[in-house]
Image (cartoon, rainbow, N blue to C red):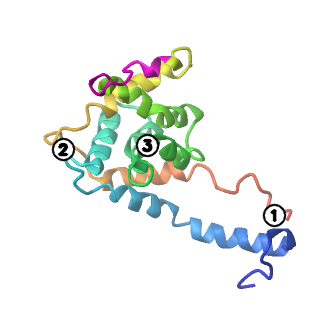
Amino acid sequence: MEQVNWTRMEDGTKEEFVSLINFEEEYNANHIERVLGHLKLLDEDWGGYKINRYQHSLQSATLAYNDGTDEEMVVAALLHDIGDIISPYNHGELAAAVLKPYVSERVHWIVANHAIFQGYYFNHHLGGDRNARDRFKDHPWYDDCVYFCYNYDQNAFDPDYDTKPLEFFEPMVRRVFAGKAAHMELNLESA
């Protein structure tokens, strides 16, 4: 089957959907390359900063790596801003959605909320609430997100820092993303 015979999903057959899932899995085999390609889109001058968002992402991951944290957090630090291009006002949520199938709930939550926590360092200069993060004060991962932002995000804009290249992190990304399959909840063998 090259294509399905329907124009409405409700008219599809079991065989067609199994075939579609197989096509998707073939396509998804290149998912990591697409994610890394999207990260590379940050490699342009946004103006104002001493380094661009791509360099910031590499530096964040380097800081996490040098801190001795686990690979999951290093990859999260690397990818935490990938949403900046297409979703600048909720980029953390977009990055967290990309990471969700592959990381712990804790790491997902940290990435999803890091922009709110990051505001601690600048919101008060712009008429905003620097303590907006405090609404999460009782959350079990509040301190972890504070730590992430303080140690891997707000301080990752140094053009002189010995930042590791993307090639250093690619094997980590592959290992973290290999942890779960997109359709793992489906039992295709019994289909």
Q: Quadrant of residue 85?
A: bottom left
Q: Residue at x 84, y 73 (%)?
A: 12
Tell me how far mark 2 sits from mark 1, CA to CA.
54 Å
Q: Secondary structure at mark 1?
A: loop
Q: Secondary structure at mark 3?
A: loop
- The boundaries of the magenta stretch are 124-134
What is the number of the mark on residue 48? 2
Residue that carries the numbered disc 1 in the rendered image? 189
- Left or right: residue 30 versus residue 118 is right
Disc nearer the start of the sequence (2/1): 2
Front residue of this view, candidates 93 and 186: 93
- Check the image and name the residue furthest to the bottom: 2
Residue that carries the numbered disc 3 in the rendered image? 89
Disc nearer the start of the sequence (3/1): 3
Q: Secondary structure at mark 2?
A: loop
- Left or right: residue 21 versus residue 92 is right
Front residue of this view, candidates 87 and 78: 87
- Left or right: residue 96 versus residue 186 is left
- Tell me residue 62's x, y (percent): 30, 40
Badge 1 amino acid: Glu
Tell which tag, 3 or 1, sits nearer the viewer.
3
What is the number of the mark on residue 158? none
Q: Residue at x 46, y 40 (%)?
A: 92
- Tell me residue 116's x, y (percent): 43, 29
**Could you classify mark 3 by the number of other residues whose Cα lies within 10 Å: few (under 14), some (14-19), or many (20 or more)?**
few
Q: Quadrant of residue 74?
A: top left
Badge 3 amino acid: Tyr
Badge 2 amino acid: Gly
Q: Residue at x 56, y 66 (%)?
A: 29
